[in-house]
Image (cartoon, grey):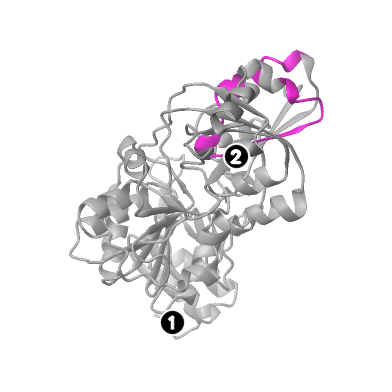
Amino acid sequence: MSYAEQYQSKLVSPEEAVKVVKSGDWVDYGFGHTKPVGLDKALAARKDELKNINIRHTLSLSPQACIEADPEAEVFTYQDWHFSGYSRKLHDRGRCFYHPMIFRNQPLFYRKSIKTVDVTMIRVTRMDKDGFFSLHMGNAAVRAALDVSKKIILEVNPLLPWAMGGREETVHISEVDYVVEFDSKIEVITPAAPTDIDKQIAAHIVPMIPNGACIQLGIGGLPNYIGSQLAESDIQDLGCHTEMLVDAYYHMYTAGKLTNKKKGVDKGKSAYAFAAGSQFLYDWIDMNPSLASYPISYTNAPHVMCQHDNMMSINACVEVDLFGQVSSESSGPRHISGTGGQLDFANGAYMSDGGMSFICCNSFYKDKKPGEIKSRIVPTLPPGSIVTVPRTQAHLIVTEYGVADLAGKSTWQRAEALINIAHPDLRDGLIKDAEQMTIWRKSNE
């Protein structure tokens, strides 16, 4: 039977395909843009027929039909490996649960610990002549989920770009139980406009990036803005080794800055695990051999990224305490995002010859009381806060007031460096806190 004949033999409606889901099943939607739309709606329509369905996804970019159809969580329980704004709001209502992970381990979690997924249903590209479908902007750990799935359903969408590999970027028609065809809008994620403080933070970092550096940009408006500033700088021959491909890499490429000539591995190619951004980013990805889609176990492996000289990791956080502990995923016990790859790249970038790990935050935020400001650099993290980067792995912390290098520093040196980049109006209070915690030396300035 030809691949085209196999395709036709497996082609059914979304309503027919989701009949394979039975009560008690775990259903996986993959990563980001691989979340199906037609299949999600068809499964939601079966709410009254099913019990105890667990849906697992990573970084939801649009509402989940099953969850919206079941506001009291009578049937569908939703869990996410990394929160988007949508997941965060669900979590606040008790409708979403988090899967703790270091990002590079996600494929290993599927293959070694989860071991079985009842049904994986994902959105993919059209099939090529050899029977393959592309995982487009959602490689990450999707191949690992497919490898342990009892049933696989593909939702074909012709609007998705074909991502070149890399590895683990495709699924073959021979592996699939059902195929459905359903056109749906591809989610565009517009970067947040930079604030004045973002611009000040970028002004500290960009001059520290040398020619030939390999760049990783984390999720958020600030890292994307710093990448855009690199595109406008005089820096030459930048490389890309990242978990997330964002608009800034396209800007670096069109400006002639992103050549990947100096990389230690994947020379001439930008390596990434997933993508989210503007439509021009997706158009750039389509059939582009200069971009290589990899699983997260490769892009986020410190022993891989450190093979690039001058590996530069740029990420954002919520708070940093005077010991150098970084919290990037919660505000106290309220979950905001996830560990993601921040710890992976903090480790790997520091291991790189000439590499640096930048973790950025505003020095302050405004409290609910008019005119009152609170420090993002705190004596100790609030109760319930999640430590994303332990003090043993923290390197460069950046606010609008400068850069604090914590690597190799004692507790009093760390406290002094961090207080020096705190908001000036809040420094005296932090010094008193440091004195009470016996991490302040009397001869400190």
The label nearer to you, 2 versus 1, is 2
The answer to whether residue 29 is above or below residue 184 is: below
Residue 444 visible: yes
Q: Amino acid at mark 1?
A: Asn
Cα–Cα span, label 2 and label 1 = 51 Å
State the SS at label 2.
strand
The answer to whether residue 154 is above or below residue 74 is: below
Q: Which residues are magenta?
A: 19-48
Q: Which residue is mark 1?
A: 444
Please name the residue shown 26% across and 59% down the image.
Answer: 230
Between residue 31 and residue 180, name the one nearer to us: 180
Between residue 205 and residue 49, name the one nearer to us: 49
Q: In the image, is residue 211 part of the stretch drawn in magenta?
A: no
Q: Residues within 10 Å of mark 1 (few under 14, many from 20)?
A: few
Which image quadrant: the C terminus? bottom left
Q: Residue furthest bottom?
A: 443
Residue 190, percent from left and from top: 35, 37
The disc at residue 30 is: 2
Residue 64 visible: no
Residue 42 appears left or right of 418:
right
Q: Amino acid at mark 2?
A: Gly
Residue 280, percent from left and from top: 30, 38
